Image: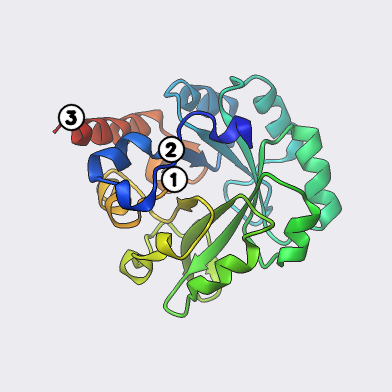
Amino acid sequence: MEKVLSKQKIPAINSWSLKEELKLVHIKVCGITSEEDAFQIAQTNIWALGFIFVEESPRFINPDKARQIIWNLPASIVKVGVFRNHPLEDVQFVRSFCSLDLLQLHGEEPPQFCEKLGRNVIKAFGVDESFDPSVLEDYAKVVDFYLLDSAQRGKSGGLGIPFNWDKIKNIKKQISRPLIVAGGLRKENIVACIQALQPFAVDLNSGVESAPGKKEARKLVEIIQILEKEVKK
């Protein structure tokens, strides 16, 4: 995990102020589908780029194309592969083939599945009205990050809407892994999300797009500028 966590230390829960949160939060942009988008976004010096290998997703990218993009990205950018209920051998193959730094599991993968992958795993959980935060700690010994995303009618991820942050506002006191927050994050709500949940990272997707799979670097720059402005207040 040295490469992934080397940029910034994670402060103790009780030491956070809003300005510290904004300074420390990492940014991941998910759903990269083109070389042009990847390179433009990489110039903003964000933490990570995500490549979705789920065929049903409008942001699906095949491993051959992802590999070509990843090979030409700066080493400082963390490369994340997103999977949903894939066979173990498929995940392992794509991880090696594309030189992925992190694996993000967005399905119903049990802890035993995560353990077989070794380290550098993000486990995603969909948050709806029935969400029970205690399930996260079932994975504490086998994953490196928790990711929370919006869920509706059994579907999670890619919905483009935020979940109810109030439902999990005290979750940092209950978990032992860094928290990544996704789900409809955009310039209008990014500061409120960070203030409410104090995450290690925010995961941006539709909020920095002009269309599904088409990233717009200008929107990402606007978000970064908003965060910088808040820090300077």
In-front residue for pair 103/120: 120
* Residue at x 80%, y 34% (from the top left corner): 97
User: Which quarter of the figure has residue 232?
Assistant: top left
Residue carrying label 2: 26
* Image coloring type: rainbow
Residue carrying label 1: 200
Residue carrying label 3: 232
Mark 2 or mark 1: whose residue is earlier in sequence: 2
User: Which quarter of the figure has residue 70?
Assistant: top right
Label 2 near label 3: C-beta < 8 Å? no
Question: Badge 1: few (under 14), some or many (20 or more) residues near its Cα, within 10 Å?
Answer: many
Mark 3 or mark 2: whose residue is earlier in sequence: 2
Label 1 near label 2: C-beta < 8 Å? yes
User: Which residue reaches farthest left?
Assistant: 233
Direction from residue 11 to residue 33 in the image, left or right: right
- Picture quarter with the N terminus: top right
> Hey, what amino acid is under mark 3?
Lys
Distance Cα–Cα, label 3 vs label 2: 18 Å
Query: On screen, 41 above or below 160?
Result: above
In-front residue for pair 92/65: 92
Name the element at disc 2: strand
Mark 3 or mark 1: whose residue is earlier in sequence: 1
Question: Badge 2: few (under 14), some or many (20 or more) residues near its Cα, within 10 Å?
Answer: some
Name the element at disc 3: helix
Task: Count the labels in the image.
Answer: 3
* Image location (x, y in percent) of residue 6: 54, 30
